[in-house]
Image (spheres, rainbow, N blue to C red):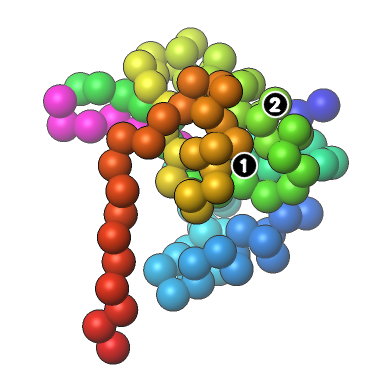
Amino acid sequence: MIREAWEAYEPFREQFTSLAPDKYPPEYIDSCVMIGSWRCWGTDEAAILFELKKYPSGITEVYGWAAAGELNAIKELIYAVEIWGRANGARAAEIESRPGWSKALASEGYEITQVCIRKVLA
């Protein structure tokens, strides 16, 4: 059974908030989930954070921020979110993540469209 919002988020909170604390402090992620700007869907095995993003061109997409838990359970949640996204006007799904996800989701139709190159300047 898929749980939503804080009920889905809380069991995986530590994993989500440790992914990029220099960019997204735990309090920020917590508040995004609490107010609903980021949705969280989850099961006992996994959870994903996502939002429905609308661009200035009018295109809407499901944007995946993070996932935690067991790979197959994450894939099932992604599929459920894709269905929800289509029903809510999304024309695409995009996932921001580490490089390994491009391989894990290639069989599901995901492909690399951009690469982010980063240099620490401190």
Instruction: Tell me the SS state at disc 2.
Output: helix
In the rendered image, residue 28, in percent from the top left (x then y), is placed at 48, 64
Badge 2 amino acid: Glu
Q: Residue at x 28, y 73 (%)?
A: 119
Q: Does residue 15 appear left or right of residue 34 in this picture?
A: right
Crowd class of label 1 (few under 14; some 14 to 19; many from 20; radius 10 Å): many
Residue that sits furthest to the left in the current view = 57
Q: Magenta stretch: residue 122 in it?
A: no
- Residue 105, above or below 118: above
Q: Residue at x 30, y 66 (%)?
A: 118
Q: Magenta stretch: residue 55 in it?
A: yes
Q: Residue at x 68, y 50 (%)?
A: 68
Badge 1 amino acid: Ile
Whether residue 9 appears in this view of the structure is: no
- Residue 104, above or below 7: above
Tag 1 residue: 48
Give the residues in magenta: 51-57
In the rendered image, residue 102, in percent from the top left (x then y), is placed at 50, 39
Crowd class of label 2 (few under 14; some 14 to 19; many from 20; radius 10 Å): some
Instruction: Tell me the SS state at disc 1.
Output: strand
Q: Are discs 2 and 1 less than 8 Å apart at CB?
A: no
Tag 2 residue: 76
In the rendered image, residue 84, in percent from the top left (x then y), is placed at 54, 18
Q: Residue at x 40, y 68 (%)?
A: 23
Q: CA distance from mark 2 to mark 1?
A: 10 Å
- Mark 2 vs mark 1: which is more N-terminal? 1
Whether residue 57 appears in this view of the structure is: yes
